Image: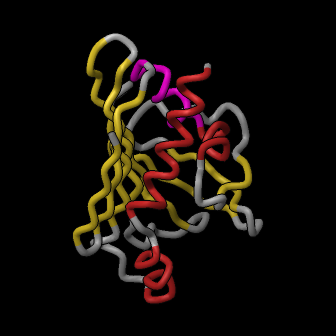
Amino acid sequence: MSDGVEFGRVVSAGREVAAAAERIFELIADPAQQPRWDANDNLSHADAGQRVRAVGDVFEMTLTRGTVRENRIVEFEEGRRIAWLPSEPGMQPPGHLWRWELEPLGDNRTRVTHTYDWTALADEKRLVRARATTSEMLRNSVDRLATLSEQE
C-alpha cells in the first residue's frame, strides 16, 4: 500500500517495504548510495566514507547540474530516523528539510515515510522548486528505495 500527503509546506509519502529497517537505513544513511534511489534524478554522486552516524554530521552531495550541497544532520536515530538540512557549502541552510522515518513491522517488513518540510524556507529563489515537490515525487523515491532494499 502506498500513500501521500500534502499539507501546505509539508509533503510526505510512505509505504510498506519487504525489507528490514536496518537494510533500508543503510541505503539512506550512506550518501554514496542515495543517487541509486533518488527518483528526482537530482543527485549525481557523493564520495564514499560519509556514512551518517549522529546529529551534527555533515555530508556533501554533488547535484546533477554540478553544484555541491552540504547536508547537516538535524535528526538521527540509528535504523529509525534521519533528517538533514541542505545548503550551499559554508552557508546557513535556507530552511528546507528532508526526513526519512522507518518503522519495523516484523521480520523483513518496514513502514517507510519520506517527508519534505519547507515550512522554514525563506529563500525566494527556492520557493518555486519547493512548491513543485509533490508527494508523488517523494513516493517515487520510496519506491526506488524499496526496489533496491528488497533485491539486496
The residue at 40%/15% (across/down) is 108
The front one of 132 and 45 is: 132
Q: What stretch is highlighted in magenta?
A: 20-30
- Residue at x-position 31% and y-position 50%: 3
Q: Residue extending furthest left? A: 7
Query: Is residue 28 located in the magenta-colored stretch of the structure?
Result: yes
Residue farthest to the front?
A: 1
Report the predominant secondary structure element of the magenta stretch. helix
Tell me if 103 is positioned left or right of 49 in this view: left
Which one is in front, 9 or 48? Answer: 9
Whether residue 144 appears in this view of the structure is: yes
Observer able to see residue 81: no
Q: Is residue 73 above or below residue 23?
A: below
Residue 30, given in percent of the width and then of the height, sits at 58, 34
Q: Residue, x 38% and y 43% (percent of image)? A: 100
Residue most extreme to the bottom: 124
Picture quadrant of residue 134: bottom left
